[in-house]
Amino acid sequence: MSGRKETVLDLAKFVDKVTGTLKGYDQLLNLVLDEAVEFLRDQDDPLKTTDQTRRLGLIVCRGTAVMLVSPTDGTDEIANPFIQPDGA
């Protein structure tokens, strides 16, 4: 191991939502995403994302920062099968 220290950028401080093509992962849920795109925050309300995007290319997301992994294509919303009809 080298005695040199390197700075690692923690994207969790800056990034809310990133989409991309999953190229790899490990047991700690570290993800390798290709063609990654970041959705930028609203400057007036930092809790909202905007339609503005920034291309990031090939990135590695640390597993500790990953909250959700889901496909963006091929998903449909269905009715909740556990809701009881009125009067039941």
Image (tube, rainbow, N blue to C red):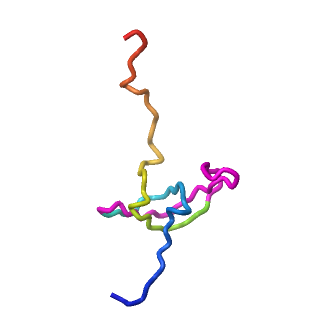
Number of numbered discs present?
0
Q: Does residue 79 show up magenta in the picture?
A: no
Instruction: Looking at this view, name the residue that lies furthest to the left.
Output: 27
Q: Is residue 7 left or right of residue 83?
A: right
Residue 69: x and y, percent? 41, 51
Residue 83: x and y, percent? 39, 22
- At a point 43% along the width and 27% down the height, the residue shown is 79
- At a point 47% along the width and 75% down the height, the residue shown is 8
In the image, 20 versus 31, the foreground residue is 31
Residue 72: x and y, percent? 47, 47
- At a point 51% along the width and 65% down the height, the residue shown is 11
Q: Is residue 26 left or right of residue 9?
A: left
Q: Does residue 37 show up magenta in the picture?
A: yes
Quarter of the image with the N terminus is bottom left
Which segment did they paint magenta? 27-53
Instruction: Looking at this view, name the residue that lies furthest to the bottom.
Output: 3
